[in-house]
Amino acid sequence: MNIFCIVTTYKNRYNFLKKVINRLVAEKIYRILIIDNNASPDFKKKLKILKRKNPEIELLIFDNNQGTAKAISDGLEMAMNSKKVDYIWILDDDNLPSENSAKFLIKKFTTLKGGRKKVLTPIRYKLKQYQEYLEGYYDFKFYENNFIKFNFINNLIRTFHKKKYFVKDVATIQMAPYGGLFFHKSLVKNVGLPNQKFHTYGDDYEYTLRMTKKRYQILLCKDYLIKDIDKTFGVSRYFEKDTDEKKMYLQIRNHTFLSRSFIKNLFFYKTNMYIFIIYMVLKNILRVTDPIFFYKRVVLILEAIKHGDKKKLKQC
């Protein structure tokens, strides 16, 4: 049973990528597609050397950053056109799977009932939400009327009454990030491709939520481990000067758009939105050393929320 692995990369992240690719080569993956989303010229040279040394590697090079949605879409199409491929495995360039992950995934997949309707996703044990899951205090889902995953009532309950979830070896979850997704190639025919209007951020959740709606089971596997070897980008970095403004805009806009899918009561949704904004501003205003920079960031955040709070996304 052959695996087609899609790995996206960009800028100058060769040190991360090389560790991941070395692990995949050791796992004897049938095809490894590296998608270069406008990496540096020096990085491109290293990629070509890597390909010459490893015949299982294929390269897809973009002259400018097309975003993850476009990269993953093109990768999935290439996997579908490869007749000898059975399974598709998606990784970020800093997702380092534990040893023998490929054997584990195939064995797990073949022992599950209705395997072709299953999607396996890992424990990424360095990330906070996965640590909370292993401790039993986190369930992977969007709550009703959430705003960018924030729901005031739910957060309040979790603060004062920590409900302990039963942590299973395999748990069905609502959605998952791209990093570590493993599924049979037939899924792509039924679910389609990622929505390229998302460009970057949230496209993985939109895609996996579509899988759930098509009655695929996304299974979080406790024994399937991935180490994230780079730090992640999140809300805590919105007011840092080295934060890429386009990334921040897309993350807020896309997650605002996704939140709309879970509105059951508009009043509660708007309340969560305003509490989220006020809390974020008050939390960071005390750290202000540059008022003009702070003001511009607040304006950008509000603009992203406004654009995401519409029925349709504009193409980036």
Image: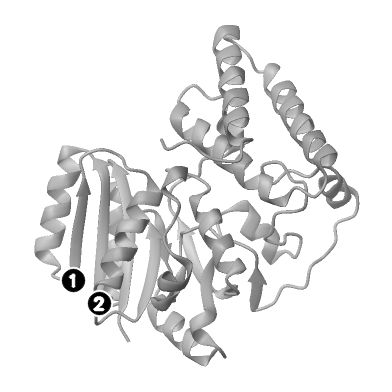
Dot 2 surroundings within 10 Å: few (below 14), some, or many (20 or more)? some
Earlier sequence position, callout 2 versus callout 1: 2
Q: Residue at x 77, y 29 (%)?
A: 274
The numbered disc on residue 2 is: none
Q: Residue at x 67, y 45 (%)?
A: 259
Q: Position of residue 127 (x, y in %)?
A: 57, 53
Which image quarter holds the C terminus? top left
Which residue does the numbered mark 1 point to in the structure image? 56
Q: 49 and 306: which one is in front?
A: 306
Looking at the picture, does residue 270 appear above or below residue 166?
above
Which residue does the numbered mark 2 point to in the structure image? 30
Whether residue 297 sits left or right of residue 49 in the image: it is: right
Q: 278 and 195: which one is in front?
A: 195
Looking at the picture, does residue 187 appear above or below residue 287?
below
Residue 226: in sight, yes or no?
yes
Quadrant of the image occupied by residue 310: top right
Q: Position of residue 270 (x, y in %)?
A: 78, 35
| Residue sitting farthest toward the front | 311
Query: Tag 1's secondary structure?
Result: loop
Dot 1 surroundings within 10 Å: few (below 14), some, or many (20 or more)? some
Query: Tag 2's secondary structure?
Result: loop
Q: Residue at x 63, y 39 (%)?
A: 256
Type of amino acid under label 2: Tyr
